[in-house]
């Protein structure tokens, strides 16, 4: 895996972990109700689920790039267009 891909995945993981998404809000809610020690299994489950999704996404993108070599630039622009399209839908 190239270093640039590893850096991009690390930045994406950090932003995902620290963003106020539903996982983090649910963790905060259950931690306030049951305490940190009562919430450890739930935190571990959310962490392992996020890690699994990131690894599977990386594996799929890597496999897709190997199978269809010219797909990366196309998917990059389609992904950027989708991200720009999203705020108008909210």
Image: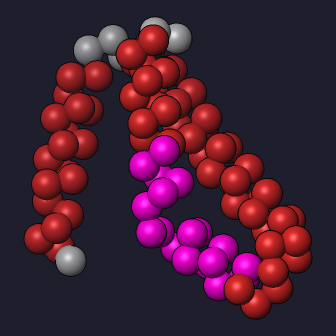
Q: Nearer the viewer, residue 70 or 3?
A: 3
Q: Nearer the viewer, residue 29 or 1?
A: 29
Main SS, magenta residues:
helix
Relative to 8, residue 32 above or below: below
Left or right: where does residue 12 sit relative to residue 47?
Answer: left
Relative to 26, residue 72 above or below: above
Left or right: where does residue 71 sit relative to residue 8?
Answer: left
The residue under the point 11% across, 71% down is: 88
The residue under the point 79% across, 57% down is: 44
Dividing the picture into quarters, in which one does residue 35 lie? Answer: bottom right
Residues shaded magenta: 14-31
The residue under the point 20% across, 63% down is: 86
Q: Nearer the viewer, residue 57 or 35?
A: 35
Relative to 9, residue 19 above or below: below
Residue 64 is situated, as x and y percent measured from the top left of the image, at: 44, 23
Dividing the picture into quarters, in which one does residue 32 lie? Answer: bottom right
The residue under the point 67% across, 43% down is: 52
Left or right: where does residue 39 sit relative to residue 18?
Answer: right
Q: Quadrant of the C terminus?
A: bottom left
Residue 68 is situated, as x and y percent measured from the top left of the image, at: 36, 16
Q: Is residue 42 visible?
A: yes
How many marks can you see?
0
Residue 20 is situated, as x and y percent measured from the top left of the image, at: 45, 69
Residue 11 is situated, as x and y percent measured from the top left of the image, at: 42, 36
Residue positioned most to the bottom: 33
Q: Is residue 26 magenta?
A: yes
Q: Is residue 39 visible?
A: no
How are the residues colored?
A: secondary structure
């Amino acid at each position: 895996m190239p270093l640039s891909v590893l850096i991009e995945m690390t930045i994406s993981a950090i932003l995902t972990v620290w963003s106020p998404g539903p996982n983090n809000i649910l963790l905060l809610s259950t931690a306030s109700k049951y305490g940190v020690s009562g919430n450890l299994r739930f935190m571990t489950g959310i962490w392992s689920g996020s890690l699994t999704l990131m690894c599977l996404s990386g594996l799929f993108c890597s496999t897709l790039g190997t199978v269809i070599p010219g797909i990366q630039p196309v998917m990059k622009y389609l992904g950027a267009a989708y991200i720009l399209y999203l705020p108008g839908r909210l």
